[in-house]
Each structure stands twice: as structure tokens, then as C-alpha cells.
């Protein structure tokens, strides 16, 4: 058997395996598991989406942000407000939209805001950038509290069951509200994953890494530093915004007006990126699952003492960092390397991001 | 006019609060080069120790001293046991570990001391003077005073003692320091212990002025302390103090005078920080890193 | 040399391996699936004799999901759920749970609650939401889908209840006695949500405004409010109530509800030298504001939100809380004059027995106890043990008195036009030396007044 034939067979097996997995999650899971499970899974997926975006910025491009909870909140509010309210601006009437039609608006708005944030980020680096983004996470909730007029006159926008329900063209076996939320989250997670995969292998992906590892060298070979870094910010913001939109279907409301929650969400994204494996394609998605399911396990393990669950989660995080400092995917790679496979392929050097 | 000075002093008091914790953050950064998310919660635990001792009848000043000693030991132990294993890993990994510590220490504090709110005594008498209509409270004087003394001591320690020299050596080049015989591990432990002790003092002073000890007492302060440390430059203790005061005053004056920003007055201190960092990317007093090509 | 094909193969292998690992892990973790297509069937409750299916009922069940009216009742157990902040900044509110659980344990120990001739035990499932509205939604979904609760009791927070009101209305689940004095609970579009015996904010404010009109009709008022919806409700209501009087609001300041830094704001308010200081604040911000006012040398007439009436908060404020006005719908457990009241004695004995760590002097525990008692009373008065019947009963309370620590002379009523329970309350003043509150004037009976006093825009939000 020639090398090409071997590879072809492996390719076919890979495609079949992936198809089976996708089919399982796209169909079997939502039709056989109850709403609590589907919602939990959906939340893991949208956290994963945001983490994939943050990974583009932090893992591949080395810019640390602990403020992406703000973009998440912006996405959530835009979707919720467009679905629930009616607006009339400058003669244009819009509002009471269905979920999918809000996504383009969310994508554009968060992309633009992300780019705007990316510009000052050109000057500010490392730890200082992290703290400026923290400012974002802290100021956004105040802005939301002041300017959003949602349900009951508060800054919470709660959606009705009709608004949250699946559209008529959706297959009826998956048309329960939780199944609809699940399917949307799954679809966007897949889309986001494919997009990251393409980006990572593209010239843009390589310039992200080049800029992260050695700015001066990257500039000297003609990479436009500003464009790369700002685009990274914009893309990561867009991912976080879409994740926010998905969260509206799952938690049935948008409420980005709590500082501690926005901060916590931002941290969750970062934790998901690191646990999953920085600068890997699928790592952050796995990280999303880790973050959600470990927290759930921690809460369920001690039902009578809710105080213990954050401690449990914290300790698990610490232990994970000892055992798998390169993340689940990164660590897996290292384990496989230890198993002694020798290939003359160049080992990827994107395992340790640049220092903060 | 009297109101302006009153607000100014109130801002200075708030600023001293942020600066106290920011100094601890800077100390950690200077020795181990990372941002310790758990600094506030470590200080919280120390503050609960003070509270618990005072409810047992121990005089406040003694309780604070005991807490400082316990915290020093605790900080050193944390460095050795929790941080040391991941020291060589990427800084992001260490950040996640400190985040884990943040969650764990907050929970464990609540488990041990309960989640309710408690009155917190201070070791100086509470009094407010009103010279010419300007409110001067003993809290402001105590906070600023202690902060000043602390800074002097730290300055002396870092610039004029062998220990200080060792800190600087370890922070800039641990390998060379090790080759020169500097006990790097022990220095790191001392660094963390010192930061924890500073945090304990900060907590014990600050919490009585917020009228009440609750498990979330340190969380809002932490955000401002981060901001102050960034504004001042992460490796400058003086920077942390000056920046803390600036942030405190900026916030107080915005809240007091710019009514259009009511509810979103955080915009001003953070906007200020962004502006400063745009022009001085390493903060007001931070040392600029030279990148060799 | 870069071996492109090999690296692509590695990449694909990596992806497949990871995907398989994920799949196996998840499948292994949750084997089989648990989606139920049929609603859980429960044993039918005792037959009711009166009132069921009457066409004049307030609750329209025509759009409710079928076969859910007796969910949560199985055998002789009624399962109910609640979502409250058990950890985080608002953890002090979890004292409500202590009082509630104690009452339920006490009821169960005495044979349980009798509904339509049959005795039932009550099982309360509590979930922590840290006062975050999204988590409340998750908790309630879980309570409904996993625990199959009959009803919700005493869910804490205005936003938290707003976040679930669509849900409970669509699924026809009683959200009983929500812990919030907000006016939105009067919105007739949401019949499955009813507020608790907390005094609705407009009545609180009006009582204080009446007091001012009697004692200082041309007073100037300085307001400190939280920067969230809670503070907004108070500010809006106060503005509404002083219309047409000679009272004037001279300055309003907001503080960040995530913390309790109020000194700058209070200093600014103090400089106006206003006659009155109105506090739309809660938790630690209350004693902080009182202390700041005292330090500023400002001694106005002070009114504090009813949610701040707690022994601990008062003691933190110390002397600065002396003379502060507020309201309460219940007896103050810390006041010695109430010690001989048999309802108070029962409360103290039973809470000490079932929740020994709870602070008996804390009004919040007393509130939880009373809400538990109100729930049991509602069940007992209900013609049958179905969700719609119980909800209807809660909406048609008639002269309910003697429940928990309810003020002895008070009577609670609800009806088609009166959707608020806690409209009878006592105006009180705190005595810092004696360390308890004293009643001021007689009992205020504002039964049915909330809807009349509040502009409909504030109710129908």
C-alpha cells in the first residue's frame, strides 16, 4: 500500500468518525436528553464559541483580554432587544425580529467595537492591556444599567415564549425551545470551529503567530502589525458577541448589568482557552465544556453547601494547571509525542504563548 | 469650596484604600512577575482573622499584628506549595492558578467564618474634625499615614538592603541570581509573604472604613487596585501609591461634580488610565522594557 | 523540511482523536438519555368540594400545558422550589431560607398541611442564584424539569422574578410570594406571579411623605439611591408622591450597588443641608450612608428602605442609626415588647429547634418564617391541591391574620383588583440605645391602595 493510499484510507475513516460524532450531537442528543441537559450542553457550546474567539486574540496573537464579557453582553443585548422591542430610528422601522436575523447585526456591531478597542490596544501591551480590558468589563455593565430600558423598566431584557420558540420551518422533532437553543448553539459552534480552523491555517493565522512571537521580525517581513492585531481583536469580539446572542436563547434573557457577572464571564472565557489549550483549534471548545461541566459537577457534589462549589472549582483549576499546563489538547499532544511517534514534520511551536 | 476639599479628602481616602492593595500586587509582580488575582481574597482572609480575634477579646492592634505574621507565613507557604509547581509554565497558566486560588480562598473564608456581615473595629478612635466646614476624618489620616510609613519602609527595604537587592535580582534574572548563590526559592517565598502581610494590613485598615465586613468586601477594591497598579506601573511601589490616589480622587470628584455621568462614573478613572497608558505604555512610573531585536 | 502532507495528516488525526475522546466522554457520562415526552403523572389529590372549575375564577387555565395542574404532588408530599442568593454579595438574604425551612419543618413535624381533607408533607428544594437573574432562570428551569415542583415560593429579587415571569405564566406555575416590593407584580398580564407581604415601595414612600406633611410640610429632601432597578423604583415613587405637596427633592445621588462606597455621595448630599435624607439603599450601603451622614455633621430626618431593617445592619451603624424611620409588615423579633406574644414565642422556639445557627433577632429570618406560614395557610385555604386552585386562593386572600409574625391587628387581602398582599404595615423608628424599633403612630391600613396610588406605567412595565 502506498503512502497516498494509506492517507486516503485514514482520511475516509476520519470523515466517517467525524460524521458519526456530529450526527450524534446534532440529532440523537437533543431528541433523547431532557431540557436541563440540552441547555447545559448549549451553554458549554456558546462559552466554547467565545473562547475560540478569545483564543485567536490571546493564544494565537498573544494579546490578553479579560474584558470579553463586555462583548458577550453587547451581543446578548442586541439580540434580545431586536427580538423583543420595536424601534423607529430616523424613519426606519425595525424590531420584533426572529433570532437568526439578529446575528448579522450582532456580528457587525461587535466586530466594529472590537476593532475600535483594538486600536488603543496597539500601544498598550501585556499586563497593562489586560487591565485596560478589565476596565471594559467593568464599565459596560454600568452603561447597560443606565441606558438599557428592558423588561419591567429594568436593565434586564426578558423574552416571551413566543419570541424564544423555534421558527416554523424548523423540524418538529427538534422544535422544543431547549432543542432550538441547543441546535443553534451547536450550529454556530461548528461554524466557528471551521472558521478558526481555516483562519489558523491561512496566511492570517500565521501572521497572528508571527506577531505574537516576535513583532519586530514580523514587521521586517512585511506583516502589517496594526492590521493583524486590530483584526484579531475584532474577530474575537465578534465571536464573543455571537456567543452572547446564543446565550439569550438558552437563559431566555439578556442582563449584562452586573459587574461581577461580566467579570466572571470574561474570566470563564480565559480559563476555557487555557484549559483547552491555547493556540489550538479545538482546544477552547473543549475548554468551554470543561468550564461548564466542572462547575456543574462542583455544584451537584455538595447540594447542601453551595459555598463549597466555587472552592471545588478553584481547586480543580489549580490541579488541572499542574497536570496539563498545555491544556487538554496540548497535553494530549505531548502524551502522544511521549508515545514515541517520530515524524519529520516540524513541531508546532505554538504551545507556549509569549509572556504576558 | 469646603465641599470641594471634603470630596478631595474623601477621594484621597478611597485612593489610599486602593493603593494599599495595589502595593501588595506590585510586590508580587516585582518578585515573581505575575498578576495575583487572589491578592484581595488573601487580604480578606487576613481581615477575618483580625475580626475573629477581636470578637475573642484581643485588642485590635494586637490582632492586626498577629494577622500580619500569620499572613506572612501563609503567603510564603502559598508560594512554595501552590505557585512553585507552575513557575516555569507560561504566565497564562499561573494566572489561571491565581484565579483558582481566588475562588478557593473566598469560599474557604466563608466556610470558616460564615457568610454574614459583621462590624469591624479599628485600632484608632473614630472622629471627624470640621475645620472651616471641611470634613477631615480620622480614617483618612490613619490610612494615608500608615500607607506613607509602609512606603518608606518598603523603599528602604527594596533599595537599601541586601534582601531588596535579592528581590530585584530574582525578578530580573532568576537564573543568574541562582548561579550567584542567591536562594531564589526562599526569596520568592519572602516576596509573597511580604505581599500577603501588606495585604493583611490593608484589609485590617480598609474594611472598618467601609462599615462592615462581608465576603465580597475585597472584590470591588481589587478592581480599582488592579487599575491603580497598571496606571502606576506594575513594578513601581511609588507608582501604585500615586496612581491609587489619582484613581480615588478622580472617581470621587466625578461622582461629586459630574452629574451627567451619574451611574457611569467609573468611566472617568478607567478612561484616565487608558489615556495615560497610551502615552506611557508602562504606566506613570513603570520601567520601560527594552526589546532587543 | 516541512512535510506538508504529514502535518495535515497529524492535524486531522488530532482532530478526530479529540472528537472521539469528547464523544466517548460525554456518552459515557450521561448514558441513555432522559427526555420524557409524557408529562409526569401523579396521584390525584383528594376531591375538592367547592369552587373548582368556577367560571368566575381569576386564573385562566385555557392556555396551560395539559395535565400539569397537579405536578409536584406525589403521594403525600408536595415539592416546592425556591431560588435565592445563598452565596455571593447578597448572601445575607439567605437568612430567609432559614426561617422558611424552619416553618416547613415545624409543619411537617406536626403531621403536615391539610389540603382538601388530606394531609401532606412539604419538601422545599432551594437553589442558589447569587442574585443573578440568568441563574434564577436556570434554577427555575431545573426545578420545573428535574424536580417537578408544584410551585415556587419566595424567589428573591425584582429582576430575578422579572426574568422568570414569562416562563411561569406560559407554564402555569405559581410563583408565590416573590420577595420584592416592586409594583410590577400588579401587572394583570402575569397572573401567575404574586408578591409577598413585603410592603410595596409606593406605600412605604407614601407613608413617609404623609409623616413629613404632618411634621415638616415644606421639607427639602436629599436622596441616595442604588444605581439599579431597586433604587430606581424608590426614586421614581418618591418623585411621584411629592407631586402636589410642598416637599422638594433637592438632590439625588446614586451609588454602585455592587459595593457600598457612599461617602462622596453623602458628603455632596450633606452639603445641601436638606431636612430629609431618603435612603433607597440596601445591605451594607445603609449603615455606610448613616455613618457618613453622621460624620458629615448632618442630622436630617432619615428614612431607610424596609429592606434595611435588620438587626445586624443597625448594629453596624451603631448610634448613627438612632431615630431612623422605616416600615415593617411584621413584628420586630428584637423588640422586648413582642417577647410575650405567643406567635413570637412559637417562632423563637421552632427556629431555634430546626435552624439553631439562625439569628432569631434578625427580621429577615422572621420574614422567611412568616412567608412559609403564609404559604401553608394558602394551601390550607385552597379548595383542592392543584396549581390553579392554589394560585386562585393566593389571589383571593380574605382577612388573613395571625400568620407567622404578622402584626396582630393586621389583615391581608387580595382580590381581582388588589394584587398586593403587604398593604397593612407599621411605620417604625429605630432606637439605637435600646437596640430595637418602636412603632410610630397606629397601624397603617392601605389595603387596596397600591393600584390606586401607582401610575399604571409603573405597574404595567
Image (cartoon, coloured by chain):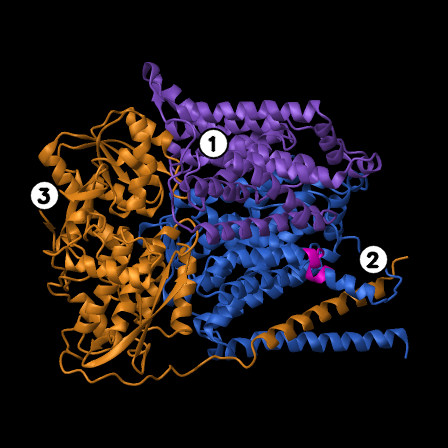
Chain colours: A blue, B purple, C orange
* Residue A170 against residue B163 in the figure, above or below: below
Q: Quadrant of residue C389?
A: bottom left
Q: Which label was assigned to residue B61?
A: 1
Q: Is residue B123 shown above or below A61?
A: above
Q: Which residue is mark 2?
A: A347
**Residue in view at x 57 percent, y 40 percent:** B71
Q: In the picture, which quadrant includes the C terminus of chain A?
A: top right
> At which x and y percent is residue C31?
56, 79
Figure check: C180 above or below C378 = above
Query: Where residue C163 appears, x then y in whole percent?
Result: 36, 59
Label 1 and label 2 in one chain = no
Secondary structure found at label 1: helix
Q: Which residues are magenta?
A: A322-330
Label 2 Cα crowd, 10 Å radius (few <14 / some 14-19 / many 20+):
few
Q: Main secondary structure of the magenta part?
A: helix
Can you tell which mark lies on residue C441?
A: 3
Let me know if residue A149 is in the magenta part: no
Q: Is residue C53 left or right of residue B247?
A: left
Q: Quadrant of the N terminus of chain A?
A: bottom right
Label 3 lies in what chain? C
Amino acid at each position: 500500500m502506498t503512502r497516498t493510499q494509506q492517507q486516503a484510507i485514514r482520511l475516509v475513516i476520519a470523515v466517517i468518525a467525524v460524521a458519526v460524532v456530529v450526527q450524534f450531537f446534532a440529532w440523537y442528543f437533543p431528541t433523547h436528553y431532557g431540557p436541563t441537559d440540552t441547555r447545559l450542553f448549549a451553554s458549554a457550546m456558546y462559552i466554547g464559541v467565545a473562547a475560540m474567539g478569545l483564543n485567536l486574540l490571546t493564544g494565537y496573537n498573544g494579546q490578553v483580554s479579560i474584558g470579553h464579557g463586555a462583548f458577550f453582553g453587547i451581543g446578548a443585548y442586541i439580540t434580545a432587544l431586536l427580538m423583543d422591542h420595536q424601534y423607529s430610528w430616523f424613519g426606519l422601522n425595525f424590531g420584533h425580529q426572529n433570532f437568526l436575523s439578529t446575528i448579522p447585526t450582532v456580528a457587525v456591531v461587535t466586530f466594529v467595537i472590537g476593532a475600535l478597542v483594538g486600536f488603543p490596544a496597539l500601544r498598550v501591551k501585556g499586563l497593562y492591556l489586560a487591565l485596560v480590558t478589565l476596565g471594559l468589563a467593568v464599565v459596560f455593565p454600568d452603561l447597560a444599567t443606565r441606558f438599557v430600558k428592558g423588561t419591567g423598566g429594568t436593565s434586564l431584557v426578558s423574552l416571551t415564549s413566543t419570541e424564544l420558540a423555534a421558527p416554523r420551518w424548523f423540524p418538529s422533532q427538534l422544535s422544543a425551545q431547549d432543542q432550538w437553543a441547543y441546535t443553534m448553539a451547536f450550529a454556530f459552534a461548528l461554524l466557528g470551529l471551521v472558521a478558526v480552523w481555516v483562519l489558523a491555517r491561512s496566511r492570517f493565522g500565521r501572521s497572528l503567530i508571527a506577531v505574537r512571537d516576535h513583532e519586530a521580525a514580523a514587521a521586517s517581513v512585511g506583516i502589517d502589525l496594526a492590521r493583524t492585531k486590530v483584526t484579531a481583536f475584532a474577530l474575537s469580539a465578534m465571536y464573543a458577541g455571537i456567543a452572547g446572542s446564543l446565550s439569550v436563547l438558552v437563559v431566555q434573557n439578556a442582563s449584562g448589568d452586573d459587574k461581577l457577572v461580566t467579570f466572571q464571564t470574561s474570566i470563564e472565557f480565559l480559563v476555557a482557552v487555557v484549559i483547552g489549550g491555547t493556540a489550538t483549534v479545538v482546544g477552547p471548545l473543549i475548554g468551554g465544556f470543561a468550564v461548564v461541566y466542572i462547575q456543574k459537577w462542583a455544584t451537584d457534589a455538595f447540594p447542601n453547601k453551595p459555598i463549597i462549589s466555587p472552592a471545588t472549582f478553584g481547586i480543580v483549576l489549580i490541579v488541572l494547571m499542574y497536570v496539563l499546563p498545555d491544556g487538554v489538547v496540548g497535553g494530549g499532544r505531548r502524551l502522544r509525542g511521549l508515545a514515541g511517534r517520530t515524524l519529520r514534520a516540524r513541531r508546532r511551536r505554538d504551545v507556549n504563548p509569549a509572556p504576558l | 469650596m469646603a465641599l470641594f476639599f471634603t470630596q478631595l479628602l474623601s477621594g484621597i481616602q478611597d485612593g489610599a484604600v486602593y493603593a494599599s492593595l495595589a502595593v501588595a500586587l506590585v510586590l508580587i509582580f516585582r518578585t515573581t512577575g505575575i498578576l495575583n488575582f487572589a491578592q484581595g481574597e488573601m487580604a480578606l482572609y487576613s481581615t477575618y482573622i483580625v475580626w475573629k480575634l477581636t470578637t475573642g477579646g484581643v485588642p485590635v492592634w494586637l490582632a492586626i499584628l498577629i494577622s500580619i505574621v500569620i499572613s506572612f507565613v501563609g503567603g510564603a507557604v502559598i508560594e512554595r506549595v501552590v505557585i512553585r509547581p507552575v513557575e516555569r509554565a507560561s504566565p497564562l497558566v499561573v494566572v489561571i492558578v491565581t484565579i483558582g486560588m481566588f475562588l478557593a480562598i473566598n469560599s474557604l473564608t466563608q466556610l470558616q467564618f460564615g457568610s454574614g456581615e459583621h462590624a469591624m473595629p479599628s485600632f484608632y478612635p473614630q472622629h471627624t474634625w470640621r475645620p472651616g466646614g471641611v470634613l477631615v476624618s480620622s480614617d483618612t489620616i490613619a490610612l494615608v499615614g500608615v500607607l506613607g510609613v509602609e512606603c518608606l519602609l518598603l523603599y528602604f527595604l527594596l533599595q537599601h538592603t541586601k534582601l531588596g537587592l535579592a528581590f530585584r535580582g530574582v525578578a530580573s534574572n532568576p537564573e543568574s541570581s541562582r548561579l550567584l548563590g542567591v536562594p531564589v526559592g526562599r526569596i520568592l517565598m519572602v516576596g509573597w509573604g511580604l505581599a500577603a502581610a501588606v495585604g493583611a494590613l490593608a484589609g485590617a485598615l480598609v474594611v472598618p472604613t467601609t462599615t462592615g465586613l462581608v465576603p465580597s468586601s475585597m472584590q470591588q477594591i481589587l478592581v480599582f487596585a488592579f487599575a491603580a497598579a497598571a496606571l502606576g506601573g506594575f513594578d513601581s511601589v511609588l507608582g501604585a501609591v500615586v496612581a491609587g490616589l489619582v484613581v480615588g480622587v478622580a472617581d470621587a470628584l466625578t461622582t461629586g461634580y459630574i452629574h451627567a455621568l451619574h451611574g457611569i462614573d467609573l468611566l472617568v478613572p478607567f478612561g484616565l488610565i487608558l489615556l495615560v497608558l497610551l502615552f506611557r505604555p508602562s504606566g506613570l512610573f513603570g520601567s520601560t522594557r527594552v526589546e532587543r531585536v | 523540511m516541512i512535510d506538508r502532507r504529514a502535518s495535515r495528516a497529524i492535524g486531522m488525526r488530532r482532530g478526530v482523536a479529540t472528537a472521539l475522546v469528547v464523544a466517548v466522554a460525554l456518552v459515557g457520562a450521561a448514558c441513555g438519555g432522559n427526555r420524557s415526552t409524557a408529562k409526569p403523572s401523579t396521584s390525584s389529590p383528594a376531591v375538592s368540594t367547592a369552587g373548582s372549575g368556577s367560571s368566575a375564577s381569576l386564573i385562566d387555565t385555557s392556555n396551560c400545558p395539559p395535565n400539569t395542574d397537579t405536578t409536584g404532588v406525589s403521594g403525600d408530599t408536595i415539592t416546592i422550589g425556591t431560588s435565592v442568593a445563598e452565596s455571593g454579595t447578597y448572601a445575607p438574604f439567605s437568612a430567609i431560607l432559614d426561617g422558611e425551612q424552619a416553618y416547613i419543618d415545624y409543619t411537617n413535624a406536626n403531621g403536615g398541611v391539610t389540603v382538601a381533607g388530606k394531609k401532606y408533607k412539604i419538601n422545599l428544594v432551594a437553589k442558589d442564584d447569587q442574585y443573578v437573574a440568568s441563574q434564577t432562570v436556570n434554577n427555575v428551569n431545573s426545578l420545573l424539569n428535574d424536580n417537578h415542583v408544584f410551585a415556587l415560593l419566595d424567589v428573591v429579587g425584582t429582576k430575578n422574578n422579572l426574568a422568570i415571569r414569562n416562563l411561569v405564566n406560559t407554564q402555569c406555575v405559581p410563583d408565590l410570594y416573590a420577595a420584592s416590593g416592586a409594583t410590577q407584580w400588579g401587572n394583570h398580564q402575569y397572573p401567575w406571579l404574586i408578591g409577598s407581604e413585603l410592603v410595596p415601595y409606593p406605600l412605604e414612600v407614601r407613608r413617609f411623605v404623609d409623616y413629613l406633611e404632618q411634621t415638616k410640610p415644606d421639607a427639602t429632601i436629599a436622596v441616595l439611591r442604588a444605581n439599579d432597578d431597586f433604587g430606581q423604583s424608590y426614586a421614581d415613587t418618591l418623585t411621584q408622591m411629592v407631586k402636589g405637596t410642598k416637599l422638594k427633592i433637592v438632590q439625588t445621588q446614586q451609588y454602585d450597588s455592587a459595593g457600598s462606597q457612599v461617602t462622596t455621595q453623602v458628603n455632596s448630599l450633606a452639603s445641601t443641608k436638606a431636612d430629609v435624607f431618603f435612603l433607597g439603599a440596601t445591605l451594607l450601603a445603609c449603615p455606610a450612608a448613616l455613618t457618613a451622614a453622621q460624620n458629615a455633621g448632618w442630622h436630617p430626618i432619615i428614612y431607610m428602605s424596609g429592606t434595611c431593617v435588620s438587626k445586624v445592619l443597625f448594629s453596624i451603624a451603631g448610634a448613627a442609626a438612632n431615630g431612623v424611620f422605616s416600615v415593617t409588615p411584621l413584628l420586630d423579633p428584637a423588640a422586648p415588647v413582642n417577647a410575650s406574644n405567643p406567635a413570637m414565642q412559637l417562632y423563637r422556639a421552632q427556629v431555634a429547634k430546626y435552624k439553631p445557627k439562625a439569628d432569631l433577632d434578625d427580621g429577615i429570618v422572621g420574614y422567611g418564617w412568616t412567608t412559609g406560614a403564609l404559604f401553608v395557610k394558602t394551601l390550607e385555604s385552597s379548595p383542592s391541591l392543584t396549581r390553579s386552585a392554589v394560585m386562585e386562593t393566593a389571589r383571593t386572600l380574605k382577612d388573613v391574620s395571625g400568620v407567622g409574625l404578622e402584626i396582630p391587628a393586621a389583615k391581608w387581602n387580595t382580590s381581582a383588583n388588589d394584587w398586593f398582599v403587604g398593604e397593612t404595615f407599621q411605620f417604625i423608628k429605630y432606637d439605637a440605645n435600646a437596640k430595637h424599633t418602636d412603632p410610630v403612630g397606629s397601624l397603617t391600613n392601605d389595603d387596596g391602595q397600591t393600584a390606586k396610588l401607582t401610575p399604571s406605567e409603573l405597574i404595567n412595565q
